[in-house]
Amino acid sequence: MNRSISGTGKRVGYLLVLLLVLTAGPALAVNLAAVERIWTPPDGGAAIRMWGFVEDPGSCTALPNSWLPGPTQQGVVNGTLSITLRNCLSEPVSLIIPGLETNLTPQTFVDAKGRTRVRAFTHEVPADNGTTVVTYSWNNLRAGTYLYQSGSHPAKQVPMGLYGALTVGRNSAAANDVVLLFSEIDPALHGSAEAANTKNYKPKYYLINGQSALPGSTPPVIAGGRNQKTLQLRFLNAGLMTHVPTIQGPYMKIIAEDSYPYPFTREQYSVLLPAGKTIDALWRPDAQASFALYDRRLSMTTNGIPGGGMLVSLNVAKKFPWILYVPPIIHGGVVLP
Amino acid sequence: MTTRFNLTMQLSAVLALLFWVSPLQAGIDGITGTNFTLSVKTGRVFTPDGGSLLLWGYADGTGPAQYPGPTLIVNEGDTITITLNNALTVAGTASAPNVSMLFPGQRAETSTTDPGVPGILTSEAAPGGSVTYTFIAAHPGTYLYYSGTDPALQVEMGLMGAIIVRPSNGANFAYNHPDTAFDREYLFLLSEMDPRIHEAIELDGPQSTAVGPYLANPFPVVWFINGRNAPDTLDIPNLPVLPNQPYNSAPMMHPGERVLMRVLGGGRDLHPFHHHGSHARIIARDGRLLASSPGAGPDLSHEVFTIKSVPGETVDAIFEWTGKGLNWDIYGTPADGPQFVHTCVDGNGDDFDDTTHEYCPDHYKPIPVVLPDNLDLAFGGFYSGSSFMGTLGSLPPGEGGLNPHGGYAYMWHSHTEKELTNFDIFPGGLMTMLIIVSQGAPIP
Amino acid sequence: MATGYHRIIMKIVLTGSLFFLGSSAVQAGVLVQCPGDADGSATWTGAEVQPVHAKCMHLGAGDGFITMADGKLQYMFGFSNLTGIPANTPTGTAEILDAGTLAASFPAPLIALDEGDEFYLTLTNIGMSMRPDLFDPHTVHFHGFPQAASIFDGLPDSSISINMGSSLTYYFKLNNPGTYMYHCHVEAAEHMQMGMLGSFYVRAAQNGTIFNYKGKDFSLFAYNDGDGSTGYDREYPIQIGSFDSAFHDASLAVQPLPFATMFDNYSMLNGRGYPDTVNPNPLPPPAENGGKLSQVESTLITASPGESVLLRISNLNVTKMNTLATLGIPMRVIGKDARQLRGPDGKDLYYNTNSITLGGGESYDVILDIPAGDAGKTYFLYTTQLHYLSNDAEQFGGMMTEIRIN
Ligand SMILES: [Cu+2]
Ligand SMILES: [Cu+2]
């Protein structure tokens, strides 16, 4: 890298971005903080140190202590998004949204052999116990589903938990939408020491929306819209492994990848969801029932115990909410008599 | 792992290959009908290194456990009923697990008269018990079935198989559209196994806690097509020494034919399935034509030279080969010898001989280079000894021999080349050979 | 490393090689077949006349060394480019063997040709200097070549492989443009892990005609699209490859090869890990191979605002699939496996995305349409399998490069 951005240059850049924000369409302004948290596995395993994005509490003190993926942000088509980030972590962090074009200002260092290397894809919030906040901005949001994640030392900071979902708009054919964020945790990389050789990444927990199904128990429930109403399924993979979300029930119509609509849709019961990928699908449930959604790469384990992991129940509500109705017992999308 | 005498099987494989011309059926083996009774049993998956792994497999009725489970070949529109018996036995005092079947792409229901016991993904058969599923085979295509009970463990242990739904158009169509017609079809159900899991289950029983780390991060070292590792893939079906692996994978074709490849991801890993020879046109995924609208046919199809097989997904692709455009005559020229005198008669104006499908613009063009002396060369077992189709050339003693009709042989294999091994031994694994033989040569 | 019928075959192969080397070295067959080329240089010089459409190349197969981005020296098998050295002369064999010794490069020499070419590719088996115990034959598998004939498919099982000290000339008539790849297919899991892999692409016959696509004139095209939609201004071959250093170290030390435990710890683009990927020059040669350049291909992508950049991406990783993403600009995917993404009745199946996922033996053609206002920007091409952003244990490396807009 032959570019290095001076502090003054950065500030000028931010002013320009701010001006754009002031003149553009509907604006979404968000305040987030990067914080250390704890994730407690459902199997009673030891609590795991995580890093995560949370709504900015205004300072780095008195933070709630349970990790989840960052809060889902909902942008407006053609609008703007600005995220002001506070850093409560021990190293600089940053924020990128792959698929939304913006002016990246890569941060570099020079290694022992004199080679310049990028350590962050864009400008960072320093590790100063939350004193400095930095704003990241995007204009002309395109409809779609996006990951927001750390752009600093991504091999470490993303698997540490610094990711969340951004949705912009909703497909006109869909009455509802749901975020299905896949990710993993390898406890070995979450100790206090500097991350070891990341090549040895071996996740033990496989999560959808921050939850790992507990083997032998009812899977976590995710609201899956209404019977006979098209639902937009937003699949995101913040993990480093490939997953294959598979739905037991009607086929999905796969409509977009990384927020870019396909020229032609295709029908599948499953989705190839590699690391960093987002896929949008339309799905029209044909029963008031709960439909299983699982990873056909069989990351269906919780700390090695089969039957858990990436498995959720998409609970489809009755078509007309105002009619009283007693739901039947259901299994795997099949209404049992 | 149990070791087993190895050489006999290797020799039998070679012999079987030599006698390929014997009347073995090509195409896709399986069971047909509308009512099936399957049982889950234990068995052993034999690998060419001489070892074997504990198998939990679906069996056809009272037959042996199979890896993969029996291929269910049914017709569009039929109501299919499958009764699953849990006959799984486990060592020691541990209890056998429940088992079940999922039918992705189908809308299966559980019978009211044989409902089994509730499970998380579907109804299950308790040890010694049963469960009956029904579904309407509403859409033609290629599908999978597999266990819905602790699938991370049970699919690994072998509980998966294929379903083929034949369209109302007829048995030589993949779907209800003329562009899906085929002359031959072959199944390529791809999978892998991590022996540590099978060994732990065999030692400690189904409740083994030792499998945990392996199930969380499997590291397979054996890879399969239709439940066999190469070179056993090329052996005959229903080989007595492979009692639980009845299916082979030995595709053959003539130039000009359309071969339907049904490629299924039965395991948990992705496999880039590279088919030497030419491109194949992907016409469907997960049992649905790549069509812009109903009835449009595969107008969104496209050609690939490597099929990305995704676990749990199916791909249908059409493969064709003629040798078109090589710029030399694959049937030889008179200068190569009197036996190479032949005609190229293109009566219908499609540039190909009407019978042999030779590409006539290349007729009698000589091969443009001279091959090195035999002393400078190493030869493959599938080499005929000649550059020319349908010809057996002279080879040093002991060379060749696996290609009695002088066909062209092409490896169809995982291009994750590591997967061309069986327990550290190359070659093997997820690999087979397509043999293209000239029009006159028999295909079983 | 063979079983069953292969084991029998390999035994005979080995015996044959020994016999040949021991008793008939005088007929050692270094021989380049290239029409119009008298001295076997695979080029046309002096009075030699290049026939219309003829293209020739002379590759050597042998061993060598490269340097990983963290400084580790890595032994490898690979191909070298011997084109230009007269081979069919009294001193030719000696010169070729000398030039090809320890000359393996990673990736293998780029092969870029034009549709309609008749390609005469001579492969000479140099042998392994560091492994005198090995007598492995080699091949070139032109991966993806449509309507292939077995004899030139480079698949040792179904055809012929060339023994040490001899040459085999392959012939290919290139009827179809697109992004292919090539590799040795002998003992594929070993020879490919060891590095016998390279990029191979064929430019479209439509090149040279002008098509206006979305307001811009193009004269270069990935495919014969008829409408300019695959037009580009610059092209970059990018080959994904990975090494398992334990495997390479075992090979150099003549130890049993760890196939089952094969686990890549170096993820690379065009034979380098980041930040060496952005070095525009050949990497300094390792002393261990006698100072021969062995990593000549940069993956630094540069372009000007408004240009369309064609990335010809292939994967020859032998252990896993890879996902390659752009950050800052979308990929427009226009081809897969050397075929335009277009349906049989002409529907364009192009799509935009941030990333493609490809296993070994797959290729994609993607176009980056650089916005007019992006001067000075840097985008990234990197794997979203973020744990591979490392050179073994060293962070901030691996499968990544930069796209610099000047
Ligand atoms: Cu080789
Ligand atoms: Cu290949």
Image (cartoon, rainbow, N blue to C red):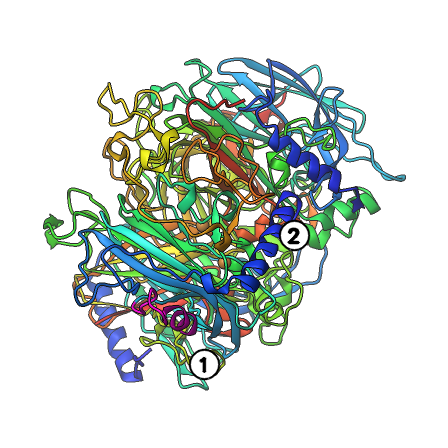
Q: CA distance from mark 1 to mark 2?
A: 34 Å
Query: Where residue B84 appears, x then y in whole percent?
Result: 70, 23
* Residue at (62, 57) in percent of width and height: C259
Which residues lie in the magenta part? C84-99
Query: Where residue B403 appears, x then y in whole percent?
Result: 53, 34
Q: Is residue A19 magenta?
A: no
Q: Amino acid at mark 2?
A: Ile
Query: Where residue A24 appears, x then y in whole percent?
Result: 21, 59
Tell which of C80 and B286 is nearer to you.
C80
Single out the mark in the foreground, 1 or 2. 1
Lateral position of residue C184 relative to residue A104, left or right? right
In which quadrant of the rendered image does the C terminus of chain C lie? Answer: bottom left
**Dot 1: what SS?**
loop
Query: Where residue B89 appears, x then y in whole percent?
Result: 82, 32
Identify the residue under disc 2: B425
Q: Is residue C94 magenta?
A: yes
Q: Amino acid at mark 1?
A: Gly
What's the mark number on residue C290? 1
